[in-house]
Amino acid sequence: MTSLLPALRGASGRTDSPEAVRFGEHVLTYARLADASAALAARITGAGRVAVWATSTPETVVAVVAALRAGVPAVPLNPRTGERELAHIVADSAPSVVLAGADDVLPSALGGLERLDVETAAIPSSEAALPDPSDASPALVVYTSGTTGPPKGAVLPRRAIAASLDALEDAWGWTGEDVLVHALPLFHVHGLVLGVLGPLRRGGSLRHLGRFSVEGVAQELLSGGTMLFGVPTMYHRLAGALDGEADAGNLTKALAGARLLVSGSAALPVHDHERITAATGRGVVERYGMTETLMNTGVRADGAPRAGTVGPPLPGVELRLVEEDGSVLQDTASIGEIQVRGPNLFTGYLNRPDATAAAFTEDGFFRTGDMATVDPDGYVRIVGRKATDLIKSGGYKIGAGEIENALLDHPGVREAAVTGEPDADLGERIVAWVVPDDPASPPGERELADHVAGLLAPHKRPRVVRYLDALPRNELGKIMKRSLGV
């Protein structure tokens, strides 16, 4: 098979190897990464599955690359996971060893596992050949957020990772000359697969900020960074800095000079798109993926960024919209559930054949649970999750996303989320959860309802407005609507 990380082949022993990853002052060249990962791979070959304590450090990169080179599935662990959930993941995935940095303090839930400290300066003890796993063999087991039960482990084969990254190479013109900047966590698909394995597959480099900061983004982009990956919360902060910071000129120059600004993991509000484009002349492109599917769609680098859309399907991905009865929608201007099929899909949920069977249709499409429409030119517009973002009110199917964007267009609204709740007359009524820009003088309920009705349609106006100090979000910036009482 073709190597998943071809740039590491032959890198061992070289002294002229270019930079692979940088975390602050800690730099791993391709030669150093090849040596350190080969040394660790030799120790874990045949280990079954290995857990990785996935801090935002070079040690995590070495650990995951070593597992891939050893042909051993890696289970990335979020260091902020609670004890009960972590114990479930460990019991479910049954790793034989946990890989961690020497200074990491591990919780008691990992106490029963053998621990191997990851060394970033290790040298292979022999030239023994590493295994050559098949494309179908599992590379990662990534646990999804549990909404109706404990998290499920999505088994991602090597071919899914290769297919998604190669499709993004085509869409974004991604090359070995690119320098990617981001501050995403490394236990998730966005930060780990796209943000680490993406540059390594291309032979490019990664500069990880450790923790997100506006200043860090500007500094790295101004010193050679060509691409920025982020989540909406990060771009919202960048947009705010462009509006109000005294030294916004540096940030404007940094963002304008980047080859590609990419947002993912949740929808980027339209007003943040507009603020960044107006200040920099550079549009933010969005893409759409899931843990189980990796990347499904993406706005091309040579395409037109269009606020509210995530672009067309990527090469190799089949995408369709379906009605609640499973019939395929012919009129894609109507809202339907996204189903996808292609080489980018996971193989199933670990130890959950029932959940795996329920996730796929008879003809092999994965049921995403995401609701969308498709523009005539193939651009996909996601309106929300089937369970929480599709509101059926007065006989209409309404997507929460467009109402949220309309609310955010009001100058008195800083953050907004929209949900539905039971209503005896309408079936469901639209509820707006609003963080006002000025808590001492929030816009009134009638004012917001009229604002939405004027931008969209009367039946899409919120019937109830609830005010909050902040919206509950997870580490990737996604609004946790179930915490709002949905």
Image (cartoon, rainbow, N blue to C red):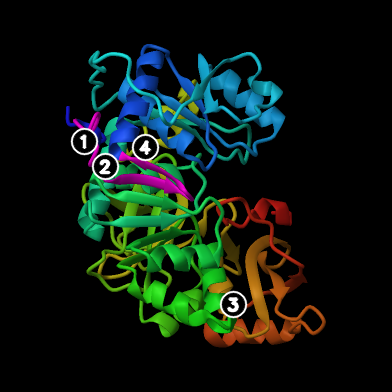
**Residue depth check, mark 2 versus mark 4: number of the one nearer the observer:** 2
**Residue depth check, mark 3 versus mark 2: number of the one nearer the observer:** 2
Q: Is 298 situated above or below 61?
A: below
Residue type, mark 2 in image: Arg
Q: Residue 205 placed where, x, y %?
A: 32, 49
Decide which of tag 1 and tag 4 comes sooner along the chain: 1
**Residue depth check, mark 1 versus mark 4: number of the one nearer the observer:** 1
**Which disc number belongs to residue 361?**
4
| Distance between the alpha carbons at the discs numbered 2 and 1 | 6 Å
Q: Circle 1 is placed at which residue position? A: 6
Given contact means CB atoms under 8 Å apart, are the residues at marks 2 and 4 in contact?
A: no
Residue 276 seen in the figure: no
Q: Nearer the viewer, residue 464 or 287?
A: 287
Q: Is 13 situated above or below 412?
A: above
Decide which of tag 3 and tag 2 comes sooner along the chain: 2
**Could you tell me which secondary element the residue under label 1 belongs to?**
helix
Which segment did they paint magenta?
10-29
171 sits to left or right of 112:
left
Label 2 crowd (10 A; few <14 / some 14-19 / many >=20): many
Quarter of the image where one finds residue 55: top right
Q: Nearer the viewer, residue 394 or 201?
A: 201
Residue type, mark 1 in image: Pro
Decide which of tag 3 and tag 4 comes sooner along the chain: 4
Label 4 crowd (10 A; few <14 / some 14-19 / many >=20): some
Q: Circle 3 is placed at which residue position? A: 408
| Distance between the alpha carbons at the discs numbered 3 and 4 | 37 Å
Q: Nearer the viewer, residue 170 or 39?
A: 39
Residue type, mark 4 in image: Thr
**Which disc number belongs to residue 201?**
2
